[in-house]
Amino acid sequence: MINIVEVRRLTKTFDGGFEALKSVNLDIKSGEIIALLGPNGAGKTTLISTICGIMRGTSGTVTIGGHDTITAYRSARSLVGLVPQEIALEPFEKVINTVRFSRGLFGKSPNDAYLKKVLESLSLWDKKDSKIMTLSGGMKRRVLIAKALAHEPRVLFLDEPTAGVDVELRKDMWQVVAQLKKDGVTIILTTHYIEEAEAIADRVGVIAKGEILLVENKADLITRMGQKTLKIDLAESVKTIPKALSKYNLTIEANGLLYAYDTAEDRTGITGLLADLKKVGLKMIDIHTRQSSLEEIFVSLVSDKDMSVNKEDVA
Amino acid sequence: MNYQAIRSIYTFEMARFFRTLMQSFISPVISTVLYFVVFGTAIGSRMESVDGIGYGEFIVPGLIMLSVMTQATSNASFGIYFPKFIGTIYELLSAPVSFLEITVGYVGAAATKAMFIGIIILATSFLFVDLTIQHPFAMIAFLTLTCLSFSLLGFIIGIWAGNFEQLQLIPLLIITPLVFLGGSFYSVTMLPPIWQTITMFNPVVYLISGFRWSFFGTADVPIGLSLMAIALFTAVCLGIIAWIFKTGWRIRQ
């Protein structure tokens, strides 16, 4: 797959000296949905803003569809739609007019039939003549998406599209995103809701303190980083782990034992453990396995990052 | 050149003007009527003619300039400040448009509004005084250039302003005094000699004088000088705007 967005050694240092992006490299493949996960202040919005032209990078390059965002900004930007994090809309204007404005601003000739399609897909068509100020928060967010889609972009940036949005609307938005992917639009979304990345992204990038820690296929990431645990419910709970079982990574839980293992290893040790349990005479009632979620992976990555940064500080 | 973008910005800005059509027109009309009642009728009837022109007629060009300059400045500054204030500027910054297109769109709309208001005041003036315009084409040209150059100035103020107070500050502190002291209601020759010299440093004198020349054929300063002054003023404003967009000052971090 070809890369539609390429970010190379991008840095951004603010006037006060704060380094928001530290040599970021990122390739976004055409047609994919990539989620950028990161805590608040990680640099997600700065990264998106720099790619889209709202901020200037301090050094490094960004290309969109092969066009440099500085030297060929017209070609680059005309491919991009941006949905900002904060709701920013002209309050006194009608929905349809703000959407028409966006389309024209990107140099596209008027096409009300297309705009009708966009508004309908976002359930906004019956609100087209309403003033923005009369809409609910969720509706305003849809208007932002409609504006970003008004000029038929190939790449759509969604900066925390579902922050502060109720569950129903969030699900609706996920559907809209899925439909856009079907239409061949590349989607980059930032979020700090892990379940959002888990639900819709093909790949996940983790960003913290201005650095991209990793970018991987969501499924690979979960498998690779995935610690699995085997919960063994026992007929009679034990107070100490029998000596014969000491070679296993076991912890005592209420009503049983918890066995942690890595799915990436050749031998998980489950067969041996079950046999040895029988040998020492422990009676099992039930067993179940659980795989760590993206959230746990994410938390462990970001806290590792914190620790390594602290170490550097000490050194 | 992204002409669609210019058209979009222009029509979007004009829509704001038409939404508030009543305020946009009524306030300049009322203030013009008040000026005519006070200066034209009450005071003007006791005044001698200026350069052989009745005082009521004499103040018409100054009145138009006063409103046009302040309206152009405030329209243009508000036009670009408002997107900054509510955050919709993100769209302009991420769109495939150059500074030229953004400026033409916003300044063009602001200048058009100011022009409308200038024409409304001129039309209202005909109700009070008997006017003949000696050089109608020059009058239109001067009016257009003034609308444009002061809209450019307003655009700069709008980008510079960090809050609504600053947005009002320059028009209030600088433009209104310059316009009042620029010969809107008097001929420069009526001033004591020392003030005549000082007033020549006021750029607005040249604009009002030139505009008045297009009405009556007489002026405080030669018409060529007036044209040069307005050209210089426009060039300076354009230069500053080009620099703003090149450096991203106050708009793009």
Image (spheres, coloured by chain):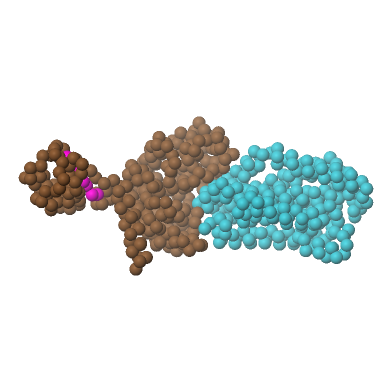
Outermost residue, top direction?
A126
User: Exactly how many numbered labels are in the figure?
Assistant: 0
Residue A184: where, in percent of width, then height? 38, 44
Residue B227 sits in which quadrant?
A: bottom right
The residue positioned 14% from the left and 48% from the top of the image is: A241
Residue A20: where, in percent of width, then height? 44, 59
Outermost residue, bottom direction?
A315
Chain coloured brown in the rendered structure: A
Front in this rendered view, residue B22 or A276: A276
The residue positioned 62% from the left and 54% from the top of the image is: B161
Front in this rendered view, residue A221 or B16: A221
The boundaries of the magenta stretch are A226-233
Residue A66: where, in percent of width, then height? 41, 56
Front in this rendered view, residue A158 or A18: A18
Residue B160 sits in which quadrant?
A: bottom right
Chain coloured cyan in the rendered structure: B
The chief SS type of the magenta part is strand
The residue positioned 77% from the left and 61% from the top of the image is: B202
Outermost residue, left direction?
A279
Side (left or right) of A19 relative to B246:
left
Side (left or right) of A186 relative to A227:
right
Residue A292: where, in percent of width, then height? 26, 46
Side (left or right) of B154 relative to A168:
right
Residue A42 counted in the magenta span: no
Residue B251 sits above or below residue B33 on the image: below
The residue positioned 81% from the left and 50% from the top of the image is: B61
- Can residue B244 be seen by looking at this rendering? yes
- Can residue A76 be seen by looking at this rendering? no
